[in-house]
Amino acid sequence: MDDELRDRIKRSAKKHALLNAVKHKSDAEVGAIMGPLMGENPEFRPHGDAIPGIVSGVVSQINDLSVDERRSRLETIAPEALTDIESEDTTDTYDLPSLPGVSDDEPTQSVRMRAAPNPNGPWHIGHARMPAVIGTYSNRYDGSFIIRFDDTDPETKRPDLDAYDDILEDVAYLGFEPDDVIRASDRLELYYARARELIDAGGAYTCSCSGEHFSKLKNAGEACPHREKSVNQTQTEFEAMIHGEYSAGEMVLRVRTDIEHKNPALRDWVAFRLIDTPHPRPQAADYRCWPMLDFQSGIDDHETGVTHIIRGIDLQDSAKRQRFVYDYFDWEYPEVVHWGHINVDEYDVSLSTSTLIEKIETGELDGWDDPRAPTLQSLRRRGIKGDAIVEAMINLGTSTTNVELSMSSIYSNNRQHIDAKADRYFFVRNGETFTLETASEDTIAGHPPLHPDNPERGERVVPVTDGITIEPADVPADGDRVWLKGYACVRRDDNHFRTTNDGIEVVREGDVDVIHWAPAPESSASISVRMRTPDGDITGIAEPDLTDAEIDDIVQFERVGFARIDTKDEQSLDTDMTVYWTHP
C-alpha cells in the first residue's frame, strides 16, 4: 500500500468516524464504520486486511476529541452530513400510533391493558416488546397496566415457580410497575362459574369424542352427536369434570359456535379439558379441570376491564373464538391491535423459552444470564439499561408485518445512557508481550484522562515497566512506529520497543497509529481480566487503575467497548476481575 492510498483511507475514515461519533453521541467504533467506508470506496477492498489497523488509529484520534470538537470538525469536512444528522435528531418518525377509540388530546375512556406471560421461564428479548409498548401507552394515557400470568396449562407449558418473580423483575428492569398482578391459576372458581352460566345460556356442551373423531366431524362441517345434550346433562357432566370423575382425554367442554363456519378452527372449540398432572403451585395443585387459554383469557379480559389488547397477527382466531363467548354474555369486546413477529439479529440461539431451558439443562449455557443467551437477565448483567431496550421496542411501532430488531439499535440507545458516566481504561485481549525502553520525561505526552469530556475526574497513570502487552492486531511491522496512548512514540525492534524523540505532532499529522497497551502479564502492576461476551470468554490484561472501579460500574475499554464490572478477586478462576461485555 503506497502513502497516497493510506492518506485517502485515513481521510475517509476520519469522516466516517466523525459521522459515527456525532450521530450516536458517543465514541466512534471501528466495526461500525467499516461497512460505510468500504461501501463508499470499493477500490479499498483489495486492502481489506490492512484497513482496520489504519482505521483504528484514526478512530482513536477522533475519540480523544470532545463532543464539541467532533461536531466542529464534521461541520468543516461534511456539513451536509451534519445537517442530516441534526434533522434526524428533531424528527420522531417511529412514535406509537394512537390507540383505536382513544384521543391523545381528550381521552374518552380509561385505558386498561395487559401483558399475559406464560411463566415457564424468564423473558427473552422478544418478550420485552409487550411490556415496553403497553407500559408506554399506560403512561401516555394515564391508564392501567396489568400483568396476568396465564398459567392454566400445568402440563405442556408447565409453569416454573421462579419465573413469576423473574418476570416481575424483568418488568421492573424495563422501568414499569404493574398496577395489578394476577395469576390465572388462582381464578379457577371464577372460570367454573362463568362456564356454568355459559351452559345455562345454551353456549356450551360436554363432549366425549376422541380428538381424532371430532376433528373429522369438524372438518366435514358435521355436528358432534353430543351437541344436543340437555343443559342439565351438560351441567352434571361438567361438575363431574370439576370433581375429577373423568381422566384426561375422557371429556371436554366445548363452546357451541357455528359448526358450518367457513373457518374450521372456530367450530365448537374446547373451553375446558382435564389434566392429570398437578399444577406446581400448591394453591392450584388439587385442580384437574383446566380452561383453555382462549376461554380463560377472554373471561379475564372482561373481568379485569381490559379496554385494549395487543397480540400477534397469528392470533387473530383467538379474538374470533372469544367473541362467541362475549356474544352469549352480551359483553363488549375490547379493541384489538395485531402486530407482526419480532426477529432479533446477532444471536445464534433462538428466541424460544423451551430451547433456552434445554440449553441450560444440558450445560450449553451457564444460566439465564449467560452473555450468550438472548434474555433480559443477560442484558441486565451486561450493563444494558432497561430504558435502552424500551426505546428500541417503541421504535418498532405496531405494524402487522414482521419486524427486525437490530441489537445495534439497543446498543446505540444504551451508549447515550452510559457514556457520560463510564470511565475509560486500557484492556488488552490475548496480547503479545514486548520489552520496553523507558522514555525520557520530555517525550511523554501526558497521561490519559478517566473521561475525555470530563477532565475534572482526573487522569490515569499506567505504570511503565520494562515490558508491555499489546493486541495482536496492533503489532507494527519491524521498524515501524506506533504511539502508545498516554505515553510516547515507540519503534519496534524485533521483540523490543524503543522510544523515539517524536512529539505528539506525529499523531496529529496522522503519521503513526495510536494504540492502547498494558503492563506485561508477569508485572506486578498488571490486572488479569476475564471478559464474558456473547461470543465466549476472553482473557486479557488491564491497567491497574481498573481496580478502582466498583462492582456494577460500567466502564469503557478504549478501542474495545463498554463493560460492566461483575466480580473481583476470583481466586478459583485465577483472575483478578471478571467483567461482562456490554457492547461496542
Image (cartoon, rainbow, N blue to C red):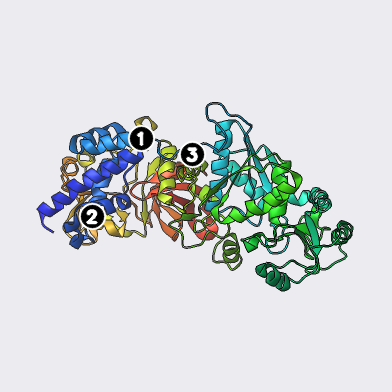
- Name the residue that disc number 3 marks: 96
Q: Is residue 486 visible?
A: no
At label 3, the amino acid type is Leu
Q: Quadrant of residue 365?
A: bottom right
Could you tell me which secondary element the residue under label 1 belongs to? helix
Q: Which circle's residue, 2 or 3, is located before the other in the chain? A: 2
| Depth order, front residue of 211/166 | 211
Is 390 on the left-hand or right-hand side of 519? Answer: right
- Name the residue that disc number 2 marks: 38
Q: At x 50% / y 56%, what residue is drawn?
A: 371
Q: Is residue 177 visible?
A: yes
Q: Nearer the viewer, mark 3 or mark 1?
A: 3
- Name the residue that disc number 1 marks: 89
Give the percent coordinates (x, y) of residue 470. 31, 55
Determine crowd level at label 1: few under 14, some 14-19, many 20+ residues with C-alpha closer than 10 A: few
Could you tell me which secondary element the residue under label 3 belongs to? loop
- The residue furthest top is 106
Could you tell me which secondary element the residue under label 2 belongs to? helix
Q: Nearer the viewer, mark 2 or mark 1?
A: 1
